[in-house]
Image (cartoon, grey):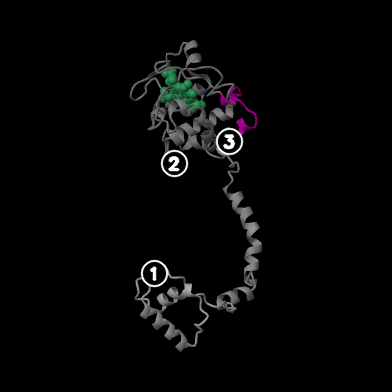
Amino acid sequence: MTEIPEHLLKRSKDRRSAMGGGSADEPASSAPAKAAAAAPATPARAEAPKPVAAPAPKPDPAYVRAAKERRKIPFWAMLPLSLLPVWAWMYVRSVQDHPEKVEGPRAVGEVIYGKCAGCHGAAGGGGAGRQLSNEEVLKTFPAIEDQARWMEFGTEKYKAAGIAIYGNPNREGGVHNTGSYGVMPGWKGELTDAEILAVTCYVRYDIGGADPASTTYAAEYEKWCNAESPEYAALKEGKTFGDPEFAAIGTEPKAGSDKALTMGG
Ligand code: HEC
């Protein structure tokens, strides 16, 4: 402890007695602290003990009092709060993926196309299977019936039937020889006839780029792929490609025809 010069001790004692503080019975040990407090200029003690204030009972500050007196939930908040569970219920329902209503051949076909995307690409760009996008599939099958039939049987059944070219024999950009690109599985048995039509519609109108409003495709679209398609409805109700009205598709591999031929029949 640093020595406090005598004159400072004296000065602080004088000051204290002038302020009315008792100093006579002050223990000697606290004298330097008091001195430091009285003469802060003294660099004697870096950490002088703080003078202890007498603990007076403090009144609550205004904001504490307000908090204590305030009603915990304002009455106007009661209605919105009581509706919270309803809102939460509606919110959860809206984000849960509830099974979307899938209707119409194109919407149904989009789901089925999941089986095809691995070979043909999600957007039909091609891969292990031929490119379908950019009207490629439409060049091969100007008529939807020929494409649906190809979907039924695939490469091997066409080959077995001795069909060298599937699809349009006058194909723009060159014919597609059966098996020239690989082996396309047939889907009869794995898919219902309604599903085969649905995925065929999806491939033509959503992947291939056929325009349902164009003069080339409007009639085909109305008949086969529109949401109210009578042919799709008939297949959904249990008709099959074996029924006479579906003879253009049929139940045997057949050489593809040019659209003109099919439409003429
Ligand atoms: C295992 C791979 C594979 C799967 C799965 C597959 N395909 Fe194919 N697809 C092919 C191959 C390979 C060819 C070419 C066949 C050939 O050369 O004989 C082809 C050809 C086609 C063609 C004719 C394209 C053209 O212009 O010549 C269409 C249309 C087609 N596939 C549609 C589908 C659809 C729709 C599905 C799903 C239901 C599907 N494919 C599933 C491999 C596949």
Q: Which mark is residue 230?
A: 3
Q: Could you tell whether 196 is left or right of 127 in the image?
A: right
User: Residue 65 location, x and y as percent?
Assistant: 60, 77
User: Residue 47 location, x and y as percent?
Assistant: 42, 68
Q: Identify the residue at image location x=58%, y=79%.
A: 56
**Which amino acid type is shown beneath numbered disc 1?**
Arg
Secondary structure of the residue carrying numbered label 3: helix
The answer to which of marks 2 and 1 sits earlier in the sequence is: 1
Q: Is residue 4 visible?
A: yes
Q: Residues within 10 Å of mark 3 (few under 14, many from 20)?
A: some
Q: Identify the residue at image location x=53%, y=23%.
A: 249
Q: Which mark is residue 45?
A: 1
Quadrant in the rendering for residue 58: bottom right
Q: Which residues are magenta?
A: 233-246
**Cα distance, mark 2 to mark 1?**
96 Å
Decide: is 251 above or below 215.
above
Toward the viewer: 113 or 226?
113
**Which amino acid type is shown beneath numbered disc 2?**
Ala
Secondary structure of the residue carrying numbered label 1: loop
Whether the magenta-drawn stretch holds residue 25 is answered as no
Q: Identify the residue at image location x=65%, y=67%.
A: 79
Q: Which residue is mark 2?
A: 213
